[in-house]
Image (cartoon, grey):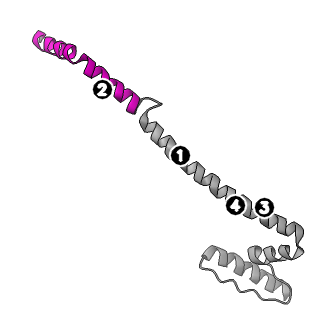
Amino acid sequence: MAGRLNNIISFIAHYKYLITIVVGILIVGILDDNSFRKLIEYQFQISDMKESIRKYDNQYVRDSRLLWQINRNPKAIEKVAREKYFMKADDEDIFVLSDDAGVSQVGDNNVDEQDEAAK
């Protein structure tokens, strides 16, 4: 038993710098809160957030233009109401063509309700 303990102590004494470097790399690279693994995860999160910021900036620009048009041109209000909310005049029929089942159901329900109200 004492022979094994002496072998372990001599091994540690012989490779103490190598063991210290390996343990330090493990702590810095993997285990620590500021590790390289966390750094890579944070970089992915940052890139996802920057992509979201670009998407919302583009949406803001489109919506700002639409709002400006609505404030300046009364025909733009009618255009938005017709295209986005499937509204119609009393003497019109609307046919909604869409591959999206959710949108066509909403459009069909609005048209059916308006047809029943007209009768």
Tell me the amino acid under the disc marked 3.
Answer: Ser
Sequence order check, earlier mark of 1 and 4: 1
| Residue at 66% in and 77% down | 105
Whole-number angstrom distance, CA of label 3 to CA of label 4: 8 Å
Does the CB distance between marks 2 and 1 fall below 8 Å? no
Secondary structure state at the residue bearing disc 4: helix
Is the residue marked by circle 3 packed among few (<14), some (14-19), or many (20+) residues within 10 Å?
few
Disc 1 residue crowd, few under 14, some 14–19, many 20+, Cα 10 Å? few
Range drawn in magenta = 2-29
Q: Label 4: few (<14), some or many (≥20) within 10 Å?
A: few
Contact (Cβ within 8 Å) of mark 3 with mark 2: no
Name the amino acid, label 1.
Gln
Where disc 3 sits, the SS reads helix
| Residue 65 lies in the magenta-colored region | no
Residue type at the position of mark 2: Val
Indicate whether residue 21 is drawn in magenta.
yes
* Quadrant position of the C terminus in the picture: bottom right
The residue tagged 2 is 22
Report x, y in % for residue 94.
Answer: 75, 86
Circle 1 sits on which residue?
45
